[in-house]
Image (cartoon, rainbow, N blue to C red):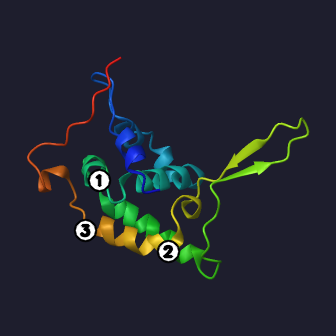
Amino acid sequence: HGSRANAELLRWRCGERPTMLQRLVSLPFRYWCVPALRRVLLPTLLCGCLHDPTNTQILSASLHPAHLVRFLQEETESAGDSPSGATPAAVLLPDPSELPIVNMDYALSARLPREEWAGAIAFFSRQPASPSSTASSPPAARSVDG
């Protein structure tokens, strides 16, 4: 979380193809409705846009930041009395073939420490509903020609 390099990668594009961030917000409707898919997609968007005004502006063209705020509030409420420590994002599991298997946890608590949730709510609560609210044109995505 909070990696400027990772946030920038979400803006790269090859030619006229959409950026990874644009592709994420264009995923089929089930990714927004099915809880298991939503619990992967929304933390990805949160981590990729948190404290990154350019990515947040790109995101806002397709998704109102209030949806991320609502998700964070739901996660805060559901966390309840559970421990506030960060969950490791990847855990090596024993494998009978002696090759390690990585079990990835895409949950919000594994990707953004709970101590940062209130700050994330504040950040996304301050964001405009669309890029046109802050600029006359959407930010340029970084082109990667190859």
Image quadrant assignment for residue 22 = top left
- Which residue has dot 3 on it? 126
The residue furthest top is 146
The amino acid marked with disc number 1 is Thr
Distance, label 1 to label 3, CA atoms, is 11 Å
Distance, label 1 to label 2, CA atoms, is 21 Å
The amino acid marked with disc number 3 is Arg
Q: Is residue 18 above or below residue 93?
A: above
In the image, 67 versus 91, the foreground residue is: 91
Q: Quadrant of the C terminus?
A: top left
Mark 2, Cα crowd under 10 Å, few <14 / some 14-19 / many 20+, is: few
Residue 105 in the image: x percent, y percent?
64, 53
Mark 3 or 2: in front is 2
Residue displayed at 85% across by 47% down: 94
Circle 2 SS class: helix
The amino acid marked with disc number 2 is Glu
Residue 118 in the image: x percent, y percent?
41, 75
In the image, 113 versus 65, the foreground residue is: 113
Q: How many marks?
A: 3
Mark 1, Cα crowd under 10 Å, few <14 / some 14-19 / many 20+, is: many
Residue 49 in the image: x percent, y percent?
36, 53
Circles 1, 3 touching at the beta carbon (< 8 Å) = no
